[in-house]
Image (cartoon, rainbow, N blue to C red):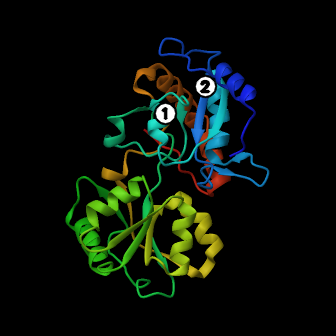
Amino acid sequence: MRMFPAIMAVAAIAFFAPAGAADWKEGAKVRIATEGAYPPWNDTDASGKLVGFEIDLAADLCRRMKVTCRMIPRAWEGIIPALRAGEFDAIMSGMAITGKRKKLITYSRPFAASPHVFVVRAGGPLAGVSTKAASVTLGSLDAGEKAAIETLRRAFAGKKIGAQAGTVFVNFLRIHMADRAGIRTFKYQGDVDAALLAGRVDALFAQTSYLKPVLDKAKEKLKVVGPGFTGGSLGEGIGVGIRKEDRALADMFSKAITAAIEEGTLSRLSLKWFGFDLSAKE
């Protein structure tokens, strides 16, 4: 991240000072944090500019809310404590809405939904793993879904599975795989991908929306195995994270998201960045 002279930093902080719970309305100044390292959700280009699906979406939502927004690159680790400490006002960083996180912050309505899958090396011993169930909704498992999870548990016994630290991916693995497989966490999702390709882990677990361009680039080197997982510990979709005391701001985002979905903007941005529509439908 580029460093600013102290006087510029002070000015920027003053200009984008938190509005306060009673001041979230048209004309407010909103600071939105994003990792900038999770393409195509959010990324940083060669010039240092933030780009990606959530960057475009944030611009659209801020226009609809009639507020002035500034995107702030922020490392994923510690992003929720930083929000609560007032370093910024919202998080748009592929963040799943989970019960655990809702104890700390509030959310807008979901704007996206994406299944989660296991990926292995195409030429490796796990490439032949298959399950009858094509999808699994956690929380209320039927017999076929339970069987699919058990098939994967047996297949991954003694193996190493990679995931990005501090994510719902790790929570899922700890619940369903920790007693069978080793779990390795990495600071960035790109490091997880590299570890799988290099053979330092045997599988990874992540969102299909993130993985599509990774799989396209890797061509025949990587392969998805097993069903797509949604719900339960993986959350209720992707939303904008907001401090609990700023419910009015969360409501503004929710209203703008609903409009963006109804008018097809979110679908259009999904197709642009992912190649398929992942807009959340309520």
Q: Residue, x 33% and y 63% (percent of image)?
A: 173
Rendered location of residue 104, percent (x, y): 36, 34
Q: Residues within 10 Å of mark 2 (few under 14, many from 20)?
A: many
Q: Which mark is residue 190?
A: none
Rendered location of residue 184, percent (x, y): 41, 68
Q: Amino acid at mark 1?
A: Leu
Left or right of residue 117, residue 136 in this image: left
- Nearer the observer, 251 or 191: 191
SS assignment at label 1: helix
Q: Residue, x 42% and y 52% (percent of image)?
A: 166
Left or right of residue 102, residue 120 in this image: right
- Mark 2 vs mark 1: in front: 1
- Distance of label 2 from label 1 (alpha carbons): 12 Å
Closer to the chain start, of discs 2 and 1, is 2
Q: Residues within 10 Å of mark 1 (few under 14, many from 20)?
A: many
Outermost residue toward the right? 47
Location of residue 253 with respect to 20 vertically, above or below = below
Q: Can residue 67 be seen in the rendering of this structure?
A: no
Location of residue 93 with respect to 193 vertically, above or below = above
Q: Amino acid at mark 2?
A: Val
Q: Which mark is residue 30?
A: 2
Q: Residue, x 45% and y 69% (percent of image)?
A: 204
- Nearer the observer, 239 or 257: 239
Which picture quadrant has residue 256?
top right
- Nearer the observer, 281 or 199: 199
Location of residue 257 with respect to 281 vertically, above or below = above
Outermost residue toward the top? 22
Q: Can residue 125 be seen in the rendering of this structure?
A: yes
Q: Which mark is residue 83?
A: 1
SS assignment at label 2: strand
Label tally: 2
